[in-house]
Structure formats: structure tokens, C-alpha cells
Image: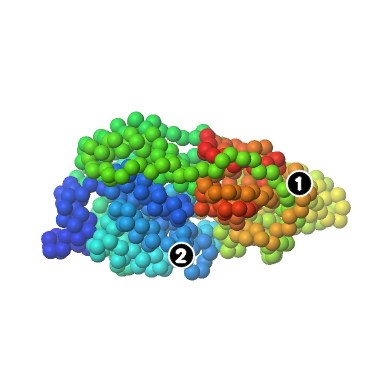
Amino acid sequence: MGVAMGGSRTALAQAEDPRGLTIRGNEFLLDGKPFRILAGAFHYFRTHPKDWRDRLTRMRAMGLNTVETYVAWNFHQPYERKADFTGWRDVAAFVRLADEVGLKVIVRPGPYICAEWDFGGLPAWLLKDKDAPLRRSDPAFERAVDAWFAELLPRFVDLQATRGGPIIAMQVENEYGSYGDDHAYLEHLRDSMRAQGIDSLLFCSNGASQDALKAGSLPDLLSTVNFAGDPTGPFAELRAFQPEGPLFCTEFWDGWFDHWGEPHHTTDPAQTATDVAKMLEAGASINFYMAVGGTNFGWSAGANLTGSAYQPTITSYDYDAPISESGELTEKFHKVREVLAEYTTLPNTPLPATPPRLPAQRVAVQESAPFMGALDALSTPVRRTTPVHMEALGQPHGLIHYRTRVRGPQETKRLRLTGLGDRALVFSDGKRIGTFDRNQPDYSVDFTVPGASSTLDLLVDPTGRVNFGHEFNDPKGISGAVLLNDEEVHDWEIRRLPLDNLSALKFTSEHTPTGPAFHRARVHIATPADGFLAFPGWDKGMVWLNGFALGRYWSLGPQITLYAPRHLWRKGRNELIVLEMERTGSDIEIRSTPDIG
Ligand code: GLA
């Protein structure tokens, strides 16, 4: 297939102008010279921007020559208004920083990215209509993607290696062969990228099977494979599909992610090194997925759906990567570095030390604000005849509350829900009477109206949108019905609770032993450094540090501590707010080492 795989660049053009990444036979050329891609995944959206340089430097120190990142659309455009490319969201600045550190860049702009990230990176507002067609040649979906690409891609144009910048390649979609086989959609994305000035090498990555490769590749683009373990089988599959062209493992899974309530995953560093050595021996290029662990800050964790089992992903995205979530150089880092050293020249600088950490301490909770009492401070209600999902009301994340008055008297009936994402606390006249859970669809609770009417409250707590697989439309809140015996309950007052700003909360020193409630603690920090927060005795919730949503904690484990990077702490007074759904613990622990199970 030769150079034509470079996309719009012809053999002739390449001879005259060998800039950028091209293909000759089974090898990559960069600016006309043989180049092996030694890349690592590092998601700028999962690491505080003030740590970007630190982590990139560590990648370079491991022997990598390239950083690979997805772009998470919903990180830039959570609401259906102008996309944000400032500060943490300045992805072009990330690319320039990589260049400064001496790394080339591979960008995977999706629009779908999977990545254990909420809704695979798609913005929640695409689910206004909960059944909206996604990831296929649907005019509305493609229009939305084109508009996003028109905002995003021009920022990369001058940063491409074809124009002297660090970006050497970009991916079209993500493992599309595991989802569908709509080639017209893939062609549309390719053309949309080209139309925005992307003239870099484009590739399609897929699972290492003929079916996935066939369904998810375009004949004029390079095909690559993603896998864990021994490369022999997967590369044979790739060769069978694409007889000529460089072998490239675009996601070498050197670790794995975790779900709440399931054991923490680790992989053996020595085995990783053995598999990497085989890949390098075969002349292949590699992208470590992940090179740098990260964090699903705030509400950004995704979920899986296996059969009908919904499995929410934890807050940490440490991934058992060579460079940990908090920047530590692990045993895997050293083992991989030894192997890479045989194939590349390592930078001649000392290895960076672990970033500084806070001393361990306990912080007492000083004040509380019961959630139900804070509804007015946090939201204004809207009325709907039937409950609607949060995306239909323009809400991307947070909680959502539904209230109605059920006329009585009525004898005890079975209260049930359909279309729940993902947990709902149920209250009758303010008293907690049960919990609905998406994984227990048959659950019901007795509901009685002794007098003229009773208030029914449902507080829905979503735990991440599905990011992989076929049943991908995963609206949050209630998208079905609330039923008393078999009759629908109508006339709802609905409150959006994105919890973007908690400044209106009124805390008092009264102790609130049961949730849902907010709790506030103040802590003095002499010198900001990385901290790891644990919640002994607490059950499930979300925590904010100085107004920044760190993420979810849950007694189900495996994750015990939440990573609180040094740049979020202030010298002097710091404020922690905890939203606990069930039971209040006594204090919050700041630890100086992570514990993710
Ligand atoms: C696939 C996806 C990635 C990620 C990994 C698992 O390969 O392409 O985004 O979800 O699986 O971590």
C-alpha cells in the first residue's frame, strides 16, 4: 500500500517534500528518515495543567519519543454553548509543551474516545433526545461533529509535523470496529479532518481481529491494533489484514482500569517488559496505554455495561501505568526503561523524584448542610408531566431531584421506577424509605398515602455514562416512568443539580449523621503538596477541594484514597466540602501515600 497510506500525500509529493510522518514499506519515516514511534498515552484532561510538564518530562525520561492523547469533547463543551480552550482546556498549549520537552505528539480527536471517560467523551447534550443516533452517518450527529471539529482542529493545523510542528499523526474515531461498520461515517470523519487542514498521517485503530479490523478500517488509511500481552498473535492478525505497512500497537494495555466494587487491577512489570521487548524485536512501533496515570476528576468517570450489569468506573485512572497518577516512577517504569534503552538513547538527565507530599493528618468536619434543605439554594425547579432525564433539561452532570405530591388517602402500593440512571434515594413526606439501583430493576418499595396527600421525593445520583459498547445511549436521572402499582405518577417538579457552584450553601454547626448532606471542613496547609484523601466511616459521595470537584468516593472500594494534587491546595486555609449520600463519618484523613486497592 506504500506511501499512499499517508492520505492526501502522494509518492511524488513525498519525494519533493519529505516533512512529517510517512510510510515506506514496513516502516515509518519522519521527515524522510526511518522513525520508530515509542509513544505513551497521557491524557491532558486527567492531570492538572501545572503538572503537564512534570509528567511529560517523566515520559521522556522513560525513553519515549512521542506522547499520545485523546481529546475529550465533553471536557471542552459540557454545555451546548461555546467550547472552552483556555487554561486546563488549552490542548494546543499541551502540544507545544510536549514539543519543548522533546516529544512528538499523536492526537486522537474522536469524536468518540471510549477511555473510561463519561459517555466516551461525547457531550451529554447530544442525549437531549435520549435515542439520538450516535457514531454513525446520521446528519444531526455529523453536523454536531463537524461544528466541533471546526472549533478544535484548526488549533492543530500549524502544529503538524508537515508544517514543522510536533504532531505526527491523528486517529479517526476509536476502535470503530467494536461498535459498527458504517464506513460512510468513517469517511465523513476523515474528510472533515482533511477539510480542516489536517494533512498528517491518519490511522484507524481496532481490536486485533479480522472482524474488528474490517469493520473499523478505511482502505486508504493505516490500520493499527490495540492489545495486551504477547504481540505475536495480534500482529499476525494485523499482517493478515494489512500485508504491508508498519506494525503499530496503538494501545499496548500495560495496566487496566477498575470498577467500583471490583478488585483493583495490576499487571506484572517483568511480563510487561518481556512483551515490550518482543514488540521492539519485531520492529514494531508502540503506544503504552497508559504511560501516565490520571484522574477522573469530578463527574468525568465512565462506566461499562456488561449484559445488563452496569459497572461504574472509579475516580482514579492510575491504570497501574509506569508513571503513577501522582507522578511516581514505578517498578514498571524502570523495567520498561531498561528495555527501551536497548533501542533508543535515554536523556542524559537524572530521573525526577516523586513530587512532594503532604504530611498525614486528620481533619474534623465542622459544619453541615442537609441536602433537602439546600434545594432552593442550589436550583430552581421546572415542571413536567412525566419525569425527564437530565440531558433533556440541558444538565450534563451532578444530581437531579424529582418531587411530586401523590393524592390520598391511598393504601400501600408498590412504587417502582423504569429507566433509572443510576441510583435514586426515595423519600415519603421527607422520610427515607428506600434506594432504587439500576442493577436491581425489580426492586420496589411500599408507598402509602395516609392523608390527603404525601410528598414523594426521588434524588437521583448518576455514577457515570457508559463509554463502551453497543448500548451507548445512557441518559441520567429518570428517562422512564415512576409507577404506583401499574399506574404512572404524573406532575413533577424537577430540579437540576449540576453542583458547579456550592457558594450558596448555608452550613450550620449542627451534626447531621445521615445523608444526603453536605459537610464542610477547613484545614490549614503550610506548604501545598500532593495529598491523598480517605473517608473512614463514610459511605458514598463527592468531594470538593477549594471549590474543585475532586471526584467520587465509595465504601465499595477498591479505591480508598482520592488524589488531591498539590496545585489545588492553597498555602494557609483550605476548604473541603463532602456530599455524603448515606452516613457521615467523623473526619477526613489526609494521607501521604495513595491507596487504590
Ligand atoms: C480500548 C479503548 C480505550 C480504553 C481501553 C481500555 O482500547 O480504545 O479508550 O477504553 O480500551 O482501557
Measured from the top left, where is residue 495 in percent x and y?
67, 60
Q: Is mark 2 on a helix, strand or loop?
A: loop
Residue 20 horizontal side relative to residue 191, left or right: left
**Quarter of the rendering containing residue 200:** bottom left
Residue farthest toward the right in the current orientation of the protein: 451
Mark 1, Cα crowd under 10 Å, few <14 / some 14-19 / many 20+, is some
In primary-sequence order, the first of circles 2 and 1 is 2
The alpha-carbon separation of the residues under discs 2 and 1 comes to 39 Å
Residue for point 31% across, 66% down: 157
Q: Is mark 1 within 8 Å of ligand 1?
A: no
Mark 2, Cα crowd under 10 Å, few <14 / some 14-19 / many 20+, is few
- Report the coloring of the rendering: rainbow
Asked whether residue 168 appears in the rendered view, the answer is: yes
Inspect the image, locate mark 2, and give the three-letter code of the amino acid beneath it.
Thr
Judging by the rendered image, the residue that carries numbered circle 1 is 512
Q: Is mark 1 on a helix, strand or loop?
A: loop
Judging by the rendered image, the residue that carries numbered circle 2 is 86
Residue for point 41% across, 42% down: 353
Asked whether residue 149 appears in the rendered view, the answer is: no
Inspect the image, locate mark 1, and give the three-letter code of the amino acid beneath it.
Thr
Measured from the top left, where is residue 332 in percent x and y?
37, 35
Residue 489 horizontal side relative to residue 206, left or right: right
Q: How many labels does the image show?
A: 2
